[in-house]
Image (spheres, rainbow, N blue to C red):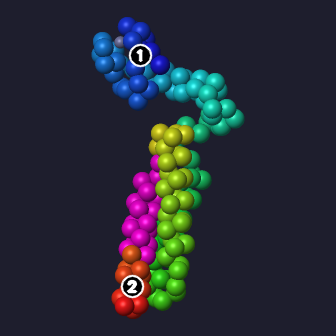
């Protein structure tokens, strides 16, 4: 997109033109993004999806909670459930990335929960392999 004052090209996430300091209007940015959606690869995507979608938000929170739950189940002795937890957490992070690309926003809670889930289940995986190696030697 281009600055409305001096015509120099500006990045879509710039708030001010780097050349002349003209404020880049949010409305203008939004219009540009709609144009990009219509003309670019995102044809068919909902234009109304301008804010963090509640579906994405709920999905990432649920996936994040389940990945933490998987870690707890693994601690309680259920084998391999932490692998599922890693999968769920990665799925949540992919959804968050997609949501961020689509709407510029994402669920902070879902993000934190899935990172915690991924960290815990990743820890369980490394710990499990470590114990496995110890038992084999
Ligand atoms: Zn300018």
Q: Position of residue 28 (x, y in %)?
A: 49, 21
Q: Could you say which is closer to the camera, residue 45 or residue 126? A: 126
Which residue reaches farthest front?
137
* Residue at the spot of label 2: 133
Label 1 – label 2 distance at C-alpha = 57 Å
**Which image quarter has ligand 1?**
top left
The verdict on residue 107 being magenta is yes
Q: Which mark is residue 39?
A: none
Measured along the vertical axis of the image, is residue 19 above or below residue 119? Answer: above
Which of the numbered marks, if any, corresponds to residue 9? 1
Q: Earlier in the sequence, mark 1 or mark 2?
A: 1
Above-or-below relation of 124 to 26: below
Which residue of the protein is positioned furthest toward the right in this rendering? Answer: 44
Q: Is residue 110 magenta?
A: yes
Location of residue 134 (image quadrant) = bottom left
Region in magenta: 106-125
- Prevailing secondary structure of the magenta residues: helix
Indicate the secondary structure of the residue bearing disc 1: loop
SS of the residue at dot 2?
Answer: helix
Residue 137 is left or right of residue 42, and the answer is left
Q: Position of residue 58 (x, y in %)?
A: 55, 58
Residue at x 52%, y 73% (from the top left corner)? 83
What crowding class fits label 1: few (fewer than 14 Cα within 10 Å), some (14-19), or many (20 or more)? Answer: few
Q: Is residue 27 visible?
A: no
């Amino acid at each position: 997109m281009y600055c409305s004052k001096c015509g120099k090209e500006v990045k879509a996430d710039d708030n001010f033109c780097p050349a002349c300091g003209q404020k880049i209007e949010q409305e203008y940015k939004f219009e540009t993004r709609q144009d990009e959606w219509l003309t670019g690869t995102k044809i068919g995507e909902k234009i109304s999806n301008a804010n963090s979608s509640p579906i994405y938000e709920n999905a990432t929170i649920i996936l994040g909670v389940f990945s933490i739950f998987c870690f707890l189940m693994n601690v309680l002795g259920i084998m391999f459930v932490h692998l599922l937890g890693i999968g769920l957490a990665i799925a949540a992070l992919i959804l968050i990335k997609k949501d961020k690309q689509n709407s510029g926003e994402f669920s902070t809670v879902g993000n934190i929960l899935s990172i915690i889930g991924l960290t815990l289940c990743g820890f369980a995986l490394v710990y499990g392999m470590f114990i496995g190696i110890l038992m084999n030697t």
